Amino acid sequence: DAKTTQPPSMDCAEGRAANLPCNHSTISGNEYVYWYRQIHSQGPQYIIHGLKNNETNEMASLIITEDRKSSTLILPHATLRDTAVYYCIVSNWGGATNKLIFGTGTLLAVQP
Amino acid sequence: GAVVSQHPSWVICKSGTSVKIECRSLDFQATTMFWYRQFPKQSLMLMATSNEGSKATYEQGVEKDKFLINHASLTLSTLTVTSAHPEDSSFYICSASDPGTSGSYNEQFFGPGTRLTVL
């Protein structure tokens, strides 16, 4: 599985958009980009995923560059409850192992 | 979304004893379950992948005789930490997926985690 690089931490003001970057320059053609988040002492929570097109759901938007070497997760109106560690993961959905390998993630601190 | 539960949510045991952690998919059938371990201020580390009815596949460096995994049904997987020692103290998290019904992506549903403390 391709590796990802994320900044270790970011701050965001409550109510503002939070833009979390992720580099995945070695991503292969059949690998998806997944985003999960983990609030302290809880299990990870799925946010969104994409292959090459931009995606949006009720939680967030995912912007993937045309060359697929990087992506940005956007939380449009961050709240205090969005404070968590956000993980960007690339994985082959159809692989025999179906594994998600977590990197170090970005600790997003939403400030009041 | 689908719900995965873990039991117990926390456990304290004496060194040398064995501890069993259960992972259940409550409203779907999980053909594949995963076990992760997370030390304080670190990321999740995948320990093993288990498929219903077959032996688990362990990640490199994970002792299969120490961390026994059983996935005997489509809704239950268990992780047994045998002869636990203080260095096994960690947050253990399971996840479950059902590729047959997940469509075109392998969304994994995570349990709330089990905090193990070995004295």
Image (cartoon, coloured by chain):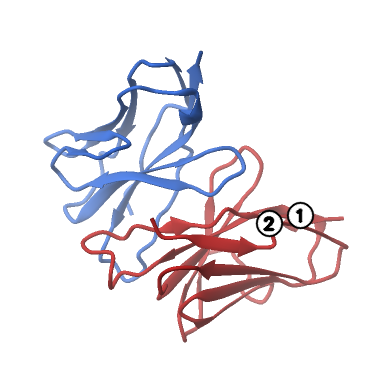
Judging from the image, what secondary structure is the residue with disc 1 in?
helix
Seen at 30% across and 44% down, the residue is A48
Residue A111, image x, y percentages: 50, 15
Q: Earlier in the sequence, mark 2 or mark 1?
A: 2
Give the answer, above or below, for where A84 lies relative to A1. above
- Give the colour chain B carries in the figure: red
Residue B89, image x, y percentages: 74, 54
- Give the colour chain A carries in the figure: blue
Tell me where residue B10 sits by quadrant.
bottom right
Residue A77, image x, y percentages: 34, 22
Seen at 42% across and 52% down, the residue is A101
Judging from the image, what secondary structure is the residue with disc 2 in?
loop
How many residues crowd mark 1 within 10 Å: few (<14), some (14–19), many (20+)? few
Which residue lies under the disc numbered 1? B87
Which residue lies under the disc numbered 2? B9
Give the answer, above or below, for where B65 lies relative to A41. below
Label 2 to label 1, Cα distance in Å?
Answer: 19 Å
